[in-house]
Image: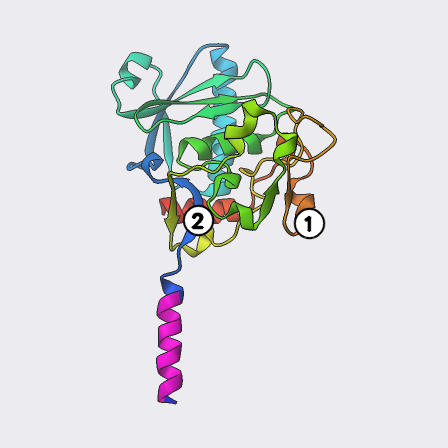
Amino acid sequence: MKKFFIFASIFFLASADDEYATNFIADMKWNSKFVKYGLAGGNVDELRALVQFTLDKFKNVFGTLITWEEDTDLNHLAKYDRYVLFSLAKHGCGTAFPGNYGPSMIVLARQPCSVDIGMAQILKVLGFTTVHKRADRDHHIRILWDNIPPTLVPYYEKFAPLMNTTKIEFKTYDLCSVLHPPAYTYYAYDVNKPIFEPIDISKMECVNGTKNDRKVSNNDIAQFKAMYS
């Protein structure tokens, strides 16, 4: 009985110290859970309505761990160490330009672009990046380099500064994450072939479709809360 207890204790301690790869950049985490933001250019009323809709949806899905407050004076806003600027996309379904000092930019798009894509841009500004950058991704997907043009190669390479963590929420490599790119893209050499495929091909359904088809997953929510609770 004593031998079993010792073995179980060692196993528990080893398990407790397990580290998992993440798609989170430690230097990009906001020290404050209070985010000031402003609106940059375009139809301000239309942009404000879209921003409010997206933030309301984000709070409804991810919770209220982050407080967002608009500052209509951009000169005053620029005095903060970190802040977010929202703008309207002229084409495509939006993007994000994160920074750990000064402004981060979130470009939102109108319908038919999904609100989930807007929430993905918020996650990027809060420190997350695409899941396929994780250090363990080669255990879960196979990159098909022959179908990727040279200009896109850096996007599909791993990202060294990503943190490891003992937080169990990151144990799963989530192919269904809103932050995982789809397997097909019109940038590929052959648009009818994927640019990567899951090692477990039965999970291909998660990465079919377009970027606009991506939805927030339960893992996205759990990982966000793990970083900001």
Which of the two discs, 2 and 1, labels the residue nearer the N terminus? 2
Residue that numbered label 2 is attached to: 21
Q: Position of residue 205 (x, y in %)?
A: 69, 44
Q: Which residues are magenta?
A: 2-14
> Is 52 situated left or right of 84 in this image?
right
Q: Position of residue 19 (x, y in %)?
A: 39, 55
At mark 2, the secondary structure is strand
Residue that numbered label 1 is attached to: 201
Q: Position of residue 198 (x, y in %)?
A: 63, 46
Q: Amino acid at mark 1?
A: Ile
Q: Is residue 8 magenta?
A: yes
Name the residue at 40% across, 49% down.
226
> Is 122 situated left or right of 113 in this image?
left
> Is 146 situated left or right of 32 in this image?
right
Name the residue at 35% across, 69% down.
13
In space, the residues marked 2 and 1 are separated at their CA atoms by 22 Å
Q: Position of residue 135 (x, y in %)?
A: 46, 45
Residue furthest front in the image: 146
Q: Is residue 93 magenta?
A: no
User: Neighbour class for label 1 at 10 Å: few (<14), some, many (≥20)?
Assistant: few
